[in-house]
Every structure is written in C-alpha cells, then in structure tokens.
Amino acid sequence: MKILVNLSLMIFLISLALVILLNFISKKAFQDREKSSPFECGFDPKTPARLPFSLQFFLIAVIFLIFDVEITLLLPMISSLELSNMFNYSSILMFFLVILLVGLYHEWNQGALDWAY
C-alpha cells in the first residue's frame, strides 16, 4: 500500500513539475486586435471569420454520447444473467432502464430533441 501511495505521489509531483516548467518556457502569445483578425489586404473584414457553433448540434452530440455509454453498460449485463439471481438482476435492470427513460423524457421535455427550429 505504501508503494502505491509513494508511486502515485511521485507521478503527481513529476507531472506538476513538468506543467510548471512548460508554463514558464512556453511561448507567450500577446493578444492584439490586428494580429488576431483575419487578413484581407489590410482592410477590416466584412463578415466574421468564425462561424457560430450550433448549440443544438452540441446538445444532440452530448445526448448521443451519454446514451452510447449507457448502452455499453447494459451489454455486459446480458452475459451476467446466468450468474445472478433473477430477482436482483431484473430489479437492477429495471432501475437502470427507468433512469434512462426519465433522462430521455427530461431531454424531450426541455426541447433538446427538437430538430426543426
């Protein structure tokens, strides 16, 4: 146990020292309006160079990621069906599915799943 604590402390200290060292020697970028704006032959640009990010796409991606992780949690439960008590297995599975359905209903109710705006 002592070895594990010592190793984790040593890894933490080394990574902290590297972060501090790299922060000191890294190139500092000075923010200047002229240098950070896109170049159009010396004139100010007519349109913004960066397009706004769609928040709807981000929400759909996060929801997909959450449900994808939950599906990967459900798949090993199929193989553990033979080794467990049927009542315990079904109650855990139903509890997990109820949490999934409540989360889906909440996202639907909040309007995060509406595609057309």
Image: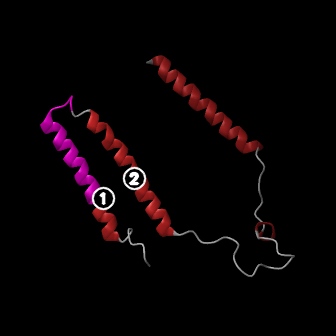
What's the distance in space between the residues labelled 1 and 2, CA to CA? 10 Å
32 inside magenta stretch: no
Looking at marks 1 and 2 on the same chain, the residue that comes earlier in the sequence is marked by 2
Q: Amino acid at mark 2?
A: Ile
13 or 46, which lies in front?
A: 46
Give the residue displayed 57% in from the left and 31% down from the top: 12
> Alpha-carbon neighbours of circle 2 within 10 Å: few (<14), some, or many (≥20)?
few
Horizontal and vertical percent for residue 68?
A: 40, 50
Give the residue displayed 39% in from the left and 68% down from the top: 112
85 inside magenta stretch: yes
| Image vertical order of residue 108 relative to residue 14, above or below | below
Q: Are marks 1 and 2 in contact (CB under 8 Å)?
A: yes
Q: Residue furthest bottom?
A: 46
Give the residue displayed 18% in from the left and 38% down from the top: 89
Question: Which residue position holds label 1?
Answer: 103
Q: Amino acid at mark 1?
A: Gly
Q: Residue furthest right?
A: 41
Horizontal and vertical percent for residue 38?
A: 77, 70
Q: Which mark is residue 66?
A: 2
- Quarter of the image containing the N terminus? top left
Tell me the quarter of the picture where residue 80 sits. top left
45 or 67, which lies in front?
A: 67
- Mainly helix, strand or loop, the magenta region? helix
23 or 79, which lies in front?
A: 79
Report the magenta residues as a range.
82-102
Q: Secondary structure at mark 1?
A: helix
Horizontal and vertical percent for residue 40?
A: 82, 75
99 to the left or right of 16:
left
